[in-house]
Image: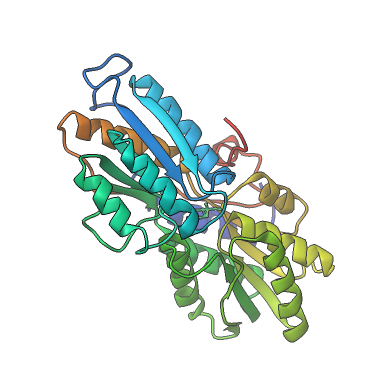
Amino acid sequence: MSTHPRQRALLAAVTATLALFATAACSSSGTSGGGGGAQAGKKITLITGVKSDPFYITMTCAAQAEAKAKGFSFSADGSAQWDVSVQRPLIDSVGAAHPDGLMISPVDTDALTPSLKQIQSSGTKVALVDTSVTDSSVGITRISSDNEKGGQVAADALAKQMSEKGSVVVISVKPGISTTDARIKGFTEEMAKYPNIKVLPTLYDNDLPATAASQIQSTLAAHPDLGGVFAGNTNTGQGVATGLAQAGKQGAVKVAAFDAEPDEITALKNGTLQVLVAQDPAAIGTEAVDQLAAAFAGKPVTASIGTTMIPITKDNLNDPQVAKYVYKASC
Ligand code: T6T
């Protein structure tokens, strides 16, 4: 653990704040029991936001294990990139197969609602995992991090790293995604508490690291006093790290990034990123299977579940209680 008192105080404060928001009850009790239960043989399908994303890979691995433990058949698929026109046909084809349960991370807050409502009206139980849609009639349960809170925590951590002065830029995926929109809202509202920090207009990289890297370059050229960056998710975090390395600004420009996939961890270790806000995608996956199992058995379902987030820095990364939140690249 860091000997630097400010670092230690920062870490303790952030950890305490985030722990307050974990309301997950990630247990497999109370639903239809292990393999061979009365609900055995039910079919659950998971559609993730982006198939190759370690956040969703970690979620899929946990959901698969929980489904197996309950005797459910489980399949997973996801879009190649964060795109409504790619995810919609996937939803429609899965819907046509009438699974008993559908776990889905919709890539937009409104565009996919008609397809999801149709699947739901055909009797499939829908669980919204990570992202959600505006229409509250969609889904028997919504399971995700408290993203707005995560954005606030990132703001406080970054402001401290920046000695509460300079310009900061937010880079995220695209507007219209429930999770990243909430992070930006939490971040910018919290940053308003720091009068000497100027928040520049938010940039969107379409979930492409290369775009984030070039956005960093152009922002540095336009704002030589750039002191901080908030990266909204995994791919953006990677791109920001690459852009700062290319500009020779590692460590000079401070970065708080969401998520904890392997490349972000490497950048944290080499000092290009300073704080990661790690989510608990495994808990989201496990809890969704448990809630669907409850629904299959006609038992009560929890409509909204918030899962753990934890701050990771170079100083606490080796703590096993922290390292267990690093995302997987495969099961
Ligand atoms: O940050 C996660 C997820 O919560 C968000 O909805 C989309 O991006 C990730 O999957 C990370 O890439």
Spot occupied by residue 76 in the image (x, y as percentages of width and height): 46, 36
Spot occupied by residue 158 in the image (x, y as percentages of width and height): 60, 68
Horizontal side, residue 274 vs residue 150: left or right:
right
Query: What colour-coding does the image apply?
Result: rainbow
Q: With respect to residue 331, does 191 lie above or below?
A: below
- Which residue is at 39% across, 47% downward? 91
Judging depth in this view, the residue of 248 and 38 nearest the camera is: 38
Residue 314 in view: no
Judging depth in this view, the residue of 298 and 317 nearest the camera is: 298
Spot occupied by residue 28 in the image (x, y as percentages of width and height): 32, 27
Q: Quadrant of residue 107?
A: bottom left
Q: With respect to residue 277, does 93 lie above or below?
A: above
Quarter of the image where the C terminus is located? top right
Outermost residue toward the top in this view: 36
Spot occupied by residue 133 in the image (x, y as percentages of width and height): 33, 59
Q: Quadrant of residue 51?
A: top right
Judging depth in this view, the residue of 320 and 77 nearest the camera is: 77
Q: Quadrant of residue 7?
A: bottom right
Horizontal side, residue 104 vs residue 85: left or right:
left
Horizontal side, residue 79 vs residue 251: left or right:
left
Judging depth in this view, the residue of 172 and 15 nearest the camera is: 172
